[in-house]
Amino acid sequence: MKPITPVILCGGSGTRLWPRSRADLPKPFLPLVSEASLFEATLERCADPGLFAAPVVVAGGRHVAAVEAQVPFGGTARLIVEPSARNTAAAIALAALRLDPDAVMLVCPSDHHIADTPAFQAAAVAAATLAAQDWLVSFGIEATAPETGFGYLLRGEPIGDAGFRVSKFVEKPDAERAREFLASGHYAWNGGIFAFRAGAFLAELGMHRPAMLAAAQEAVARGHEDGARFHPDAASFGKIASESVDYAVMENTARAAMVPATMGWSDIGNWQALHAARAQDAAGNSACGPAELVECRNVLVESDGPRVSVIGLEGVIVVVDKGEVLVTSAAGAQLVGKLSGAVNQ
């Protein structure tokens, strides 16, 4: 099998983990779970030269400095600088247009945590096997709880030994439907990790979103290189409507497939998810920075300096960063991105 080309998508507004994550330095570039940033950990998972080619990173201009501070560009590693944010379908199209049509792309968000790298790599190989046969492949993350914040994949018939057809893409369900999905055993979370042959992805994009493909082709044709950076033409790229790859392609193609992935995955989508991904004491508490917790359960404290003392609380999150203080219940963590401080960064 040819080496798989990792396509790492960087971006985000930095609102859901505010105040630690900010628009200028959103969560991909922060060391939230280990000493490495989430972005660095993503690159490390795809660093085995026996499996992977050099990465292609797609990032907005606002984040170029952060990307280049954490990845050694030069050689065959490449950076595509998006002129504006147009969601994942357009970002993937840019990468596909810069690759050989027969290259197998492994599209990875840069801000996820995956605890089991060997399991991730095994799933990547299975996905690449299907992608080489022109299946458009999603990682079906093992559903371990009735989550209402994720999309779901309904597993269809097997495709050899590598994976399954996707019978249906399901948007974020309510709690009752999520419990039914979990109990059935036939549904997986849609984790936003994909594998495509570059030419097959572009063909499907042209079938379902021809205007998007035409604008992306024009942006690449009129773009220019600057060392390891490639700058698509801003005016051409600006014609593209913002749309996720799920809506633009995956929910429309007749070639949707999935590979099961049990790999300790988290999208670190809010402070509660970060708490779950971190090491905890016997009472479920986790602290990063100076803190003292007395008679507490399931409390997360994150401080960049001031000492935080918490007594007798349960299910609370306290964050102190650059002069901002956030206190929320675990349930309220879903709403952090709506705070004026997060929105008006």
Image (cartoon, rainbow, N blue to C red):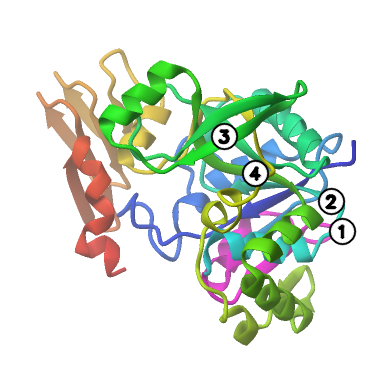
Mark 1, residue position: 100
Mark 4, residue position: 194
Q: For the residues carrying marks 3 and 2, which lies nearer the camera in this image?
A: 3
* Pointer 3 or 2: first along the chain: 2
Verify CB contact (< 8 Å) between mark 2 and mark 1: yes
What is the x, y in percent for residue 152?
Answer: 46, 36
What is the x, y in percent for residue 44?
Answer: 68, 39
Verify CB contact (< 8 Å) between mark 1 and mark 3: no
Mark 3, residue position: 167
Residue 262's mark?
Answer: none
Give, as a three-letter code, the residue at label 4: Phe
Query: Is 203 placed left or right of 174 in the picture?
Result: right
In the image, residue 265 sits, relative to residue 321, either above or below, namely: above
What is the x, y in percent for residue 163?
Answer: 69, 27
Q: Secondary structure at mark 4?
A: strand
Give, as a three-letter code, the residue at label 3: Ser
Q: Residue at x 20, y 21 (%)?
A: 297
Q: Residue at x 42, y 29 (%)?
A: 277
Using the image as rendered, state which of residue 35 and residue 173 is in the foreground. 173
Q: Secondary structure at mark 3?
A: strand
Q: For the residues carrying marks 1 and 3, which lies nearer the camera in this image?
A: 3
Quarter of the figure with the C terminus: bottom left
Using the image as rendered, state which of residue 124 and residue 49 is in the foreground. 124
Magenta segment? 59-85
Q: Give the farthest residue toward the right.
A: 1
Query: Is 42 placed left or right of 344 in the picture?
Result: right
* Pointer 2 or 4: first along the chain: 2
Give, as a three-letter code, the residue at label 2: Ala
